[in-house]
Image (cartoon, rainbow, N blue to C red):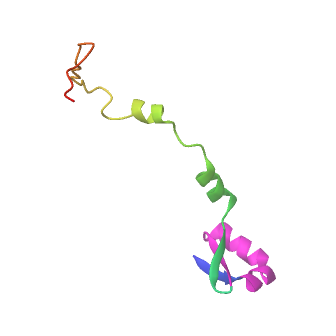
């Protein structure tokens, strides 16, 4: 990732945009502190696309067909010591 001082990025904006499109993210600094990153539209769309749901994750799990032996206590109450 290439680093640009804000004043240089403003003066050479078209180059910064071209490099973001061709080479990847371009970091902009203000007084030496990283402040912003310019990315291509394709990268933005990739990062912003909808993620799968939890239900979808479970349905596509390689453990979907594993049988579990889940035993639960069937009595309506249990003994508690105070």
Residue 19 is a magenta residue: yes
Q: Residue at x 64, y 86 (%)?
A: 32
Q: Percent position (x, y) of residue 74?
A: 23, 14
Horizontal relation, residue 16 to residue 59: left or right: right
Relative vertical location of residue 34 with respect to residue 76 in this rendering, above or below: below
Q: Nearer the viewer, residue 49 or 19?
A: 49
Residue 18 colored in magenta in the image? yes
Quadrant of the snapshot with the C terminus: top left
Q: Position of residue 35 (x, y in %)?
A: 66, 75
Image: 49 above or below 65: below
Q: Residue furthest front?
A: 82
Q: Which residues are magenta?
A: 6-30
Residue at image position (21%, 23%) is 69
Picture coordinates of residue 57, whole percent (x, y): 43, 36
Residue 52 in the image: above or below residue 1: above
Q: Is residue 75 above or below residue 56?
A: above
Main SS, magenta residues: helix
**51 or 71, nearer to the observer:** 71
Image-quadrant location for residue 39: bottom right
Quadrant in the picture for residue 17: bottom right
Residue 59: percent from the left, percent from the top? 41, 29
Q: Quadrant of the N terminus?
A: bottom right
Residue depicted at 19% across the width and 21% down the height = 79
């Amino acid at each position: 990732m290439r680093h640009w001082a804000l004043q240089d990025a403003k003066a050479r904006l078209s180059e910064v945009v071209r490099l973001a499109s061709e080479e990847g993210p371009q970091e902009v600094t203000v007084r030496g502190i990283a402040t912003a990153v310019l990315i291509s539209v394709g990268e933005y769309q990739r990062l912003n696309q909808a993620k799968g749901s939890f239900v979808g994750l479970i349905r596509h799990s390689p453990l979907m067909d594993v049988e579990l032996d889940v035993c639960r206590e069937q009595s309506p109450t249990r003994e508690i010591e105070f």
